[in-house]
Amino acid sequence: MQPIRTVCVYCGSGPGANPAFVEAARRFGRILAENGVGLVYGGGSLGLMGAIAKSVLEHGGRVTGIIPEFLTDREKALTQAQELIITRDMHERKRTMFERADAFVALPGGIGTLEELVEQMTWSQLGRHRKPILIANVEGFWDPLCVLLDHMTEQGFIRQRLAVNLIVAQSVDEILPKLCDAARTLSEGETGMTSAPADRM
């Protein structure tokens, strides 16, 4: 069994149109802190990113923010985090987030959130790692993506041997239990990734 010690959360740098999104981020931050699970995230203090990180800190948890230098002003890097890593570029940021995390969760967000989520799904599909990947389907936010993935499967582009075990949680309270259940089947050697650079994955 491989325990969940840290969770990488991908989410929007804005709050979104539905107040439930910020509420979910704050709730999940509290859950992480209360269960002794560290947060790894994009390092900003705005939007859902700021909401979850500040919630973790408010409830006594640990936060590792990872942000590229060119975004430190735009996304207002959260200097209160116990660890703030400033990277040279997005490739280094994503690689470092991967290395620091035992699992991945996507809260609502925009193109950047989607890109980070799909990249982890791609790496998993290609056998580069087996860390759990979960989408938090707050207020049905990710329903269109789930429909698209089903469509890709029906059309033969996601074949059985290339299927990704994407976990879906309909409520925030389900997230950590589902990640822990998925992690029980993994050994230490199955969670890492090959040593190739992230831009060659």
Image: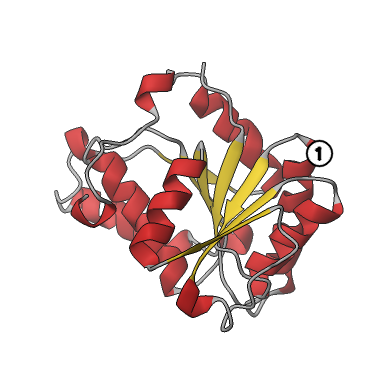
Q: What element does badge 1 sit on? A: helix
**As rendered, which of 137 and 104 lies closer to the eye?**
104
- In which quarter of the view is residue 43 placed? bottom right
Q: How is the image coloured?
A: secondary structure
In the image, taking residue 181 as reference, residue 27 lies left or right, namely right
Q: Residues within 10 Å of mark 1 (few under 14, many from 20)?
A: few
Q: Amino acid at mark 1?
A: Glu
Relative to 17, say whether 21 is above or below.
above
The x and y percentages for residue 166 are: 41, 42
- In this view, 114 is above or below 169: below
Q: Can you see residue 136?
A: no
Image coordinates of residue 22 in percent, x first then y, are: 72, 67
Residue at the (55%, 62%) spot, across then down = 42
Nearest the eye: 2 or 78: 78
Count of numbered badges drawn on the protein:
1
Residue closest to the far bottom: 74
Q: Quadrant of residue 115?
A: bottom left
**Residue at the disc numbered 1:** 34
Q: Where's residue 172, x and y in %? A: 68, 48
Q: Residue at x 66, y 48 (%)?
A: 171
Residue 189 shows in the view:
yes
154 and 40: which one is in front?
Answer: 40
Q: Residue at x 50, y 43 (%)?
A: 100
